[in-house]
Image (cartoon, rainbow, N blue to C red):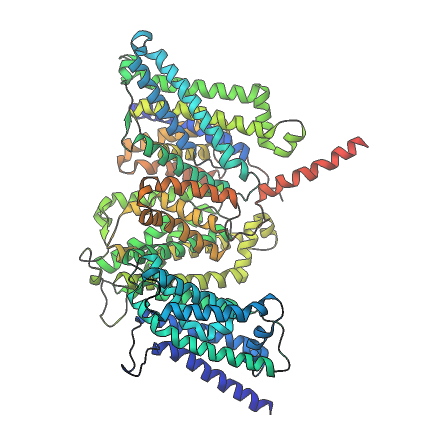
Amino acid sequence: MTDLRARLHRVALASGAAVLVSWPLAGFTATAEKGPSFPLDPAIRIGLVVLGLGTCWAYALRIRALGPGGLLKWGAAAVRSPGWVGQAFWGLFVALLAIGLVLATVPWIGSGRFRLLLGALTCILLCLTMGLPGLLVLQNTLLMGIVAGASALLDGDGRAAVEAFRSTFPVAAVLGTVYAVGLAAWAILAPKVPPRLKEGPELRWGSLAVLLAFMVALPSFASRTWTSNLVEALVFATIALGLNITMGMAGLLVLGHAAFWAVGAYTFTLLAVQCGWNFWLAFPAAGAAAAITGLLLGLPALRLRGDYLAIVTLGFGEAIRWVLKNESGITGGDAGIPGSEVPGDVRAVHGPAWLWQPRTTNDCYWFALGLLVLCVTCVTVLSRSRFGRALFALREDETAAKCMGIDTVRVKLIAFTASAFWAGLAGVVHPIFRGQITPDLFDFNASVLFVAMVVLGGLGSIPGSIAGAAILFLLPQLLRDKFPAIQEYRMLIFGAVMAAMMVVKPEGIFGRAGKAGEDGAGEEGGPEGSAAPAAGAVR
Amino acid sequence: MLQSLVTGLVQGSIYAVVALGYTMVYGILLLINFAHGEILMVGAYASVLAFATLTWSGAVGSLGALPCLALSLLGAMAVSGLYGFTLEKTAYRPLRHAPALSPLISAIGMSILLQNFVRIYQGSAPVYFPARSEEIFGTGGLSLGGVVVPPLDLFIVLTSVALMAGLYAFVQRTRLGKAMRATSQDKTMAGLVGISVDRVISVTFVIGSVLAAVAGMLLALYTTQAKFDMGFMAGLKAFTAAVLGGIGNLRGAMLGGVLLGIAESVGIQVFGAEYREVYAFVVLLAVLILRPRGLMGERLAEKV
């Protein structure tokens, strides 16, 4: 009996997953007059599939926890939940649905961007109100809403998004209504519902899936300028994450991280463009070359601590840059080397035509995104491993870590190597994407920027490094693009914001509050410590 | 060879003066003051502008060049001191108890801010010192074994030596110097024995900034110009010098600065000018591998 129920449950899950995945694939635009058509950009469609898979996974987790019929029970609990959530639910749902329908379908209300933005906001609010059950049905709408709103904001070509949005929304809204009515019926009829709704892995996986889907779909509606900006932001995020291994986790201040990036970029360019290697061979080779460089730097740096290490890495970074500048026979000197055989035409990077490799700006974007996702995965796994714990121990107290039996030499060397490896891999993107690399791209300012990204986001925090990279790279670009009037004051504002952010939130955006550094903690302990002897003297 | 030794000594003296500021701040706050080079740059600009104003007003003609140079130096010291004071108050003091790397980022932010502030309001082209050094110090100079040392070089070396000696005496002999040493050893205990730690830190910043102003003027005289990004390389070299000598140690900073300047000019002489920025770091790396805490740094026992 239970066996049969479990099997039925599995079948239901599988078919649900199939529907969820195929639904966004279809693009939702079959009409009676025109027949099925697919107005969606492939990127959006891939994004939707990712979203579908992510939500499937999330719901599978939740449903497995709730037992058979779990999905409906869960939805019913949302409807019947007491308090302001339950009461506000229906009112908001109906109101938003009505507004959204009117805005998205009636062409003469509002105009252009304003309407798009309102519609997008409505959709997002709608999904938020309905909670995750709403997301299940309205995922398509949500994504369309975000896409439309973002393209309105990012100055991109929003026409594809508008079309998709307008053709999708009514269908999704009808489905949502049907689902909501079903939920209401179940809520009235079902005797018991599970009380716990908020926590659980599905929220995290669901939001991650939404984010990833959005990122995959982004180039199809963002303008070319913004796609290029985002390519660089993704590359910097990968490098910052790599640096986070040595700086955030192991607590070693590195001021020459741009050197590893440079080694990766130059290795790739020399191998792929000058020697004609296949892209997929030159790509790991770049990472390997940077990793070996990191190992070589790690060896003399082992004896040094704190700021002595910082200055040695700084000198190392400068030395690499000067080698690139001066050995013009190989590296092209100040002018740099072209990242392709024909400058400006990245297609000329060697490789068979059938094998995918980044050739256009959009390709570079997806490649950088994939690299970042890979990096996030690896660093997350690393930080939760035995080795990761050893790194954290090293950061907190090197002497104590040594006493606990941690081989600090080995740990430091691996940290250096791993962090350099990611910078080297990330170095592959710029030659293809810019078509030319010069030594000045990898100067001390770049190294300092990486350090700032890690610290601003919060030492040791993975989302922090990504956020730090996004803020520190995109903020000047945004100031340049959106506020040309203050063009001249761009870097001034940037510096002021950087200092102000540290003063406002010293532990970084995602940093753990209350955990001060060794020096800070020692001083904070001071006032309490000073009270005791004083009291003793009075007595 | 002797010529490059002299050049190295002159450059090294300038590095040493800047390194003193670095090392003093580091000794007390354990903070790499990244904006120190920018303070130097501000000082250089102030001295150039002050000297230009004095030339315009005819003071140079009536008083003579040297007193006017002294006057503009005083002005630059005042301006730089004010900048250093404000910098510490706004960007570093709120972060006194923050995690160790936060003030560093704040310092980098302030460095970018100051650099761009000057770039916007003074232009990105260099500002030239209004008078050539021969017009101020006269021609001639000291002849040392076939090498003629111009008076400007002598002036730079003598000024640096005087500053170092003065600072050393200040730190070792005066009450405030004693308070500074106490604060750098243990801030809590210094506070307990009645030292106003905040005041000591402020004074340290002002002294460091005043020294940076002197170095800025010397650099502007030596290179005949001031530029908005001149502080970057000077700051980097000075920081290297401070670490070379053992950061936090005044005598070490002097030794490190001079050694660095000589290593650089001898390196250029022997290996060519292509890698001129690298020699300093090679020397640093060699020294740090042999002595991980710098030439004069104490070997501290690790606190557990």
Find residue A354 and report its horizontal and vertical position in percent. 24, 72
Q: Nearer the viewer, residue B172 or A81?
A: A81
Q: Is residue B201 above or below residue B73?
A: below
Q: Nearer the viewer, residue A538 or A31?
A: A31
Q: Examine the image and state in which quarter residue B147 appears.
A: top left
Find residue A198 and report its horizontal and vertical position in percent. 58, 68
- Quadrant for the N terminus of chain A, please: bottom right
Q: Is B286 on the left or on the right of B297, as rendered?
A: left
Farthest top residue in view: B62
The residue at 36%/74% (across/down) is: A168
Q: Nearer the viewer, residue A460 or A43?
A: A43
Find residue A294 and report its horizontal and vertical position in percent. 40, 52
Q: Is residue A524 above or below residue A430?
A: above
The residue at 49%/64% (across/down) is: A381
Q: Nearer the viewer, residue B80 or A339?
A: B80
Task: Mark yes or no: residue B125 visible.
Answer: yes
Number of numbered discs visible in the structure rendering: 0
Find residue A260 and report its horizontal and vertical position in percent. 36, 51
The residue at 53%/71% (across/down) is: A90
Farthest front residue in view: A108
Q: Is B146 on the left or on the right of A316, as rendered?
A: left
